[in-house]
Amino acid sequence: MTDSFIIAFSTYSRIPMPKADWNEKSMKYAMCFFPLVGVVIAFLELFIWRLAGFIKTYNMITAFFLLLVPVAVTGGIHLDGLFDTEDALHSYGDREKKLSILKDPHVGAFAVIFGVMYMLGAFALATEIDIEALIAVCFSFVISRELSGLSVVSFPKAKKDGMVSEFSDSADKNVKTVLLAELVVTVLCMFLFYIFGNIELAYPAVTLAAAVISFLRYRYRIVPQFGGTTGDLCGYFLCNCEFLILFSNILVWKIMDLR
């Protein structure tokens, strides 16, 4: 189990980890620990927020560091998937062409266009964030990884080789159940936190709704275009899920502020 934890963090984060034996046994439950990377990001986001409040930085500086945390922790692995998938989707080619674009290490025009829009949009939204919305966004880092993990072990695969297929083939049959249980616990904790914190329940409600919408779009709109999921598509989903949750919570905050 320790090796599974190490493999999950070694694969999906830049956090230094000791060596582990990459074998079928150690990879069985690796995906169960993937959401813990989101937990680390969430705590770092809250730390940055408290530090920024203590030294009284400008909103733009705080937003920059809030945006930097997930990139620094993950090494940008999910953004790479976002960029590659945008290139593939906007090629409007057939399935084989889209899959070949995902393999291409070169950056295309659409990756740059939509990647820049994504980063600027997330930065602009982060300049408007408050603590209630930030807490929901922190939960999103965990929820998005739980849903992404579920897609790895549940969705058809576009390729027989690659990281996603390797993790899926090695995963124990109980991994899906574990990830579902983790998701339920995370959502319950999110709602309980807002209930006992006497904070508007609109925040966790829109967070859950945004996550569901992102996941359904991913499963029924994006995955069929590629004949299954891939590592890049998982990164694409994760980034879009977190962005939509951020956008939804800022929108809720603005509506609350108008009241």
Image (tube, helix red, strand yellow):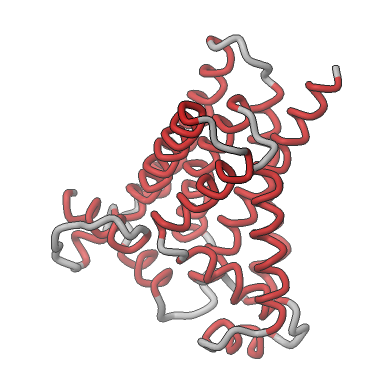
Count of numbered tags: 0
Give the residue at the far right of this rendering. 258
Q: Nearer the viewer, residue 200 or 223?
A: 200
Q: Is residue 42 left or right of residue 102?
A: left
Q: Percent x, y for residue 196?
A: 53, 10
Q: Is residue 210 left or right of residue 54?
A: right
Viewport quadrant of the C terminus? top right
| 103, above or below 73, in the image | below
What residue is shown at x 50% (from left), y 44% (from top)?
A: 141
Q: Is residue 46 left or right of residue 170?
A: right
**Quadrant of the rendered image containing residue 197:** top right
Q: Is residue 102 visible?
A: yes
**Quadrant of the rendered image containing residue 116:** bottom right
Q: Is residue 94 left or right of residue 22?
A: right
Q: Is residue 185 visible?
A: no
| 108, above or below 121, in the image | below
What residue is shown at x 18% (from left), y 49% (from top)?
A: 1
Q: Percent x, y for residue 107?
A: 59, 84
Q: Percent x, y for residue 198?
A: 60, 9
Q: Percent x, y for residue 203?
A: 67, 27
| 101, above or below 17, in the image | below
Q: Nearer the viewer, residue 172 or 63?
A: 63
What residue is shown at x 35% (from left), y 48% (from top)?
A: 32
Q: Nearer the viewer, residue 36 or 181?
A: 36
What residue is shown at x 72% (from left), y 73% (from top)?
A: 113
